[in-house]
Image: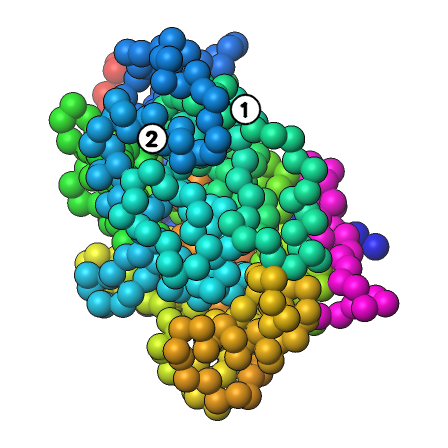
């Protein structure tokens, strides 16, 4: 039977509704504060729905906005160089470089090409080229399959030449026909390669002549499909964002601003702003002239450090929250919205089961858009899906700390964080951020207490996908890179954390005060080290607050009575 769907966040009752109205469950101090504000500072109505940051709805979708670069100065259909025929994508690239002479040198500096990043703070060697994740585990050693999402041609092993400009794939980011696709760079086992058979041929000339600034579909071909399927990895990046309504994302909505990814991830010489390896958790600079900075992809770089109109006490307090609360915390009340679920649990322990010697898969989840999702595959194990998910919340300073292939840990540890993060209230650099929490059981080296490279894709007998021998797959995966392996593997629980920053809801659906400042079901119930009015109780503060509030009310009442009864009789007539 399909797994039951979680009630969408927009349909859930107001936090604290069970057992009485939230007002009744607030502390006296909190209720008193609201009484005082109502008496002394009547709130001005919020800005109308047409004001920033929620764009007005438009009848027709405008062209996608791709940052400061708009339009173009050339019609590529008129270039003889792009008329073809082309034998392969590399020939298209050579034609592109004939005019864009310096682009190859620029492009080779970005992480989409190198898959490599050295953290300047920790010195860790990061990037897809090296890291282990808790989805398909590792790209290294499986390049034949995984480099379908590399912005180049032909990377199937360690011999790939990263200095060859002709191997850059220009089309994957710039073609707009929607007919371009990539296949594995090596054959792989017949059990898996069969999925790529029967695809229609690509008209490379048509694709080359269609080039434009990158659209959401270009970026999404890889980023929406990270982790092995639609929205599997991030939770806030799915195919639903190809042409979303603004109720799903106010920035990308086709009936709103219709931003392409590069509107925020601005490029400078083909190096993009924004990285999961180097997150700006607290932007203290805000906007730059003429209103947009190109070095970061933060909310503040466009909206500034005081984004809420100060036309009420509420607006003033919301701006005060910006110092401690990430914009995403309030403005992304849930992720995995739009009908596309995300994977929240993956169990490699059950992989390798066969029927009559052949691998199989099972569908066991129907997501919001009606599509069926696999809940078991012989090559990967069991998956658990969810959607309309309330994030986890924690202090975050932007620093991620990874468990790499070299990291040793206690094999008896309850859980290993694949990518943990740091942050606290006291450091001055952190804010409370929303996260997706991903849980996995995955293989590790029991003897050395390290994670392992698993050889998944290949034509040989050790490739797990098709042969289902985990011991052989790990042994080859480690040996191929000269890594020490004890010969004994097991499975260990791992967690990974994914900062949520897409699927920004309209401001009318942003979190309200009562979602956090409530004694039960507070969004921030797990955030420790702070006193949160309404969520927390302190008898002394509650008592003092009650005395002050009712003392103030008594003073107002006495003052009014004195004025009434002290008026001359003639004034009363």
Q: Quadrant of the N terminus?
A: bottom right
Q: Which mark is residue 94?
A: 2
Question: Label 1 neighbourhood size at 10 Å, few (<14), some (14-19), many (20+)?
Answer: some
Q: Quadrant of the C terminus?
A: top left
In the rendered structure, does residue 239 fall within the stretch colored magenta? no
Q: Residue furthest right?
A: 356
Counting from the top left corner in percent of width and height, residue 206 is at: 50, 19
Q: Is residue 504 above or below residue 390?
A: above
Magenta segment boundaries in residue numbering: 351-375
Residue drawn 55% across and 48% down? Answer: 184
Find disc 1 in the rendering and name its residue.
203
Q: Which mark is residue 271?
A: none
Residue drawn 36% across and 41% down? Answer: 167
Q: Nearer the viewer, residue 470 or 266?
A: 470
Q: Is residue 427 above or below residue 94?
A: below
Disc nearer the start of the sequence (2/1): 2
Q: Is residue 65 visible?
A: yes
Of helix, strand and loop, which one carries label 2?
Answer: helix
Q: Is residue 550 visible?
A: no
């Amino acid at each position: 039977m399909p797994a039951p769907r979680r009630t969408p966040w927009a349909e859930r009752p107001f936090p604290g509704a069970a057992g009485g109205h939230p007002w009744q469950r607030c502390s006296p101090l909190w209720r008193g504060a609201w009484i005082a504000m109502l008496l002394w500072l009547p709130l001005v109505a919020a800005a109308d729905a047409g004001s920033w940051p929620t764009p007005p709805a438009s009848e027709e979708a405008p062209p996608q906005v791709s940052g400061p670069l708009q339009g173009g100065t050339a019609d590529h259909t008129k270039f003889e160089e792009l008329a073809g025929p082309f034998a392969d994508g590399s020939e298209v690239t050579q034609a592109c470089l004939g005019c864009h002479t310096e682009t190859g040198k620029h492009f080779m500096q970005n992480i989409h090409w190198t898959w490599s990043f050295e953290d300047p703070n920790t010195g860790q060697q990061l990037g897809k080229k090296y890291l282990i994740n808790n989805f398909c585990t590792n790209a290294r050693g499986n390049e034949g399959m995984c480099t379908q999402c590399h912005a180049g041609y032909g990377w199937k092993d360690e011999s790939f030449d990263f200095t060859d400009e002709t191997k850059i794939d220009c089309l994957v980011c710039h073609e707009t026909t929607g007919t371009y696709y990539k296949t594995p760079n090596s054959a792989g086992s017949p059990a898996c390669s069969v999925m790529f058979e029967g695809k229609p041929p690509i008209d490379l000339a048509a694709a080359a002549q269609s080039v434009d600034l990158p659209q959401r579909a270009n970026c999404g071909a890889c980023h929406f499909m990270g982790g092995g399927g639609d929205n599997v990895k991030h939770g806030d990046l799915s195919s639903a964002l190809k042409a979303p309504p603004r109720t799903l994302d106010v920035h990308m909505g086709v009936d709103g601003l219709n931003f392409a990814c590069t509107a925020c991830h601005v490029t400078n010489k083909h190096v993009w702003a924004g990285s999961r390896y180097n997150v700006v958790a607290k932007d203290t600079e805000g906007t730059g002239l003429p209103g947009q900075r190109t070095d970061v992809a933060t909310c503040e770089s466009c909206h500034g450090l005081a984004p809420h109109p100060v036309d009420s006490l509420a607006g003033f307090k919301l701006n005060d929250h910006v110092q401690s609360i990430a914009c995403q915390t309030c403005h992304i009340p849930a992720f995995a919205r739009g009908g596309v679920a995300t994977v929240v649990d993956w169990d490699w322990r059950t992989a390798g089961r066969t029927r009559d010697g052949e691998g199989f898969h099972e569908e066991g989840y129907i997501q919001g858009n009606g599509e069926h999702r696999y809940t078991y595959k012989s090559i990967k194990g069991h998956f658990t899906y969810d959607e309309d998910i309330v994030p986890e919340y924690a202090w975050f300073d932007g620093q991620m700390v990874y468990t790499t292939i070299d990291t040793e840990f206690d094999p008896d540890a309850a859980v290993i964080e694949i990518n943990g993060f740091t942050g606290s209230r006291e450091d001055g650099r952190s804010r409370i951020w929303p996260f997706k929490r991903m849980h996995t059981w995955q293989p590790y080296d029991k003897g050395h207490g390290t994670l392992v490279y698993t050889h998944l894709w290949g034509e040989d007998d050790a490739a797990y996908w098709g042969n289902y021998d985990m011991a052989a797959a790990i042994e080859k995966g480690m040996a191929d890179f000269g890594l020490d392996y004890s010969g004994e593997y097991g499975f260990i629980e791992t967690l990974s954390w994914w900062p949520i920053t897409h699927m920004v809801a309209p401001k009318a659906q942003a979190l309200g005060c009562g979602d956090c400042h409530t004694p039960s079901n507070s969004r921030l119930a797990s955030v420790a080290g702070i006193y949160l009015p309404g969520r927390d109780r302190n008898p002394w503060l509650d008592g003092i607050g009650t005395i002050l509030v009712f003392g103030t009310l008594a003073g107002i009442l006495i003052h009014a009575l004195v004025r009434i009864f002290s008026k001359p009789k003639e004034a009363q007539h």
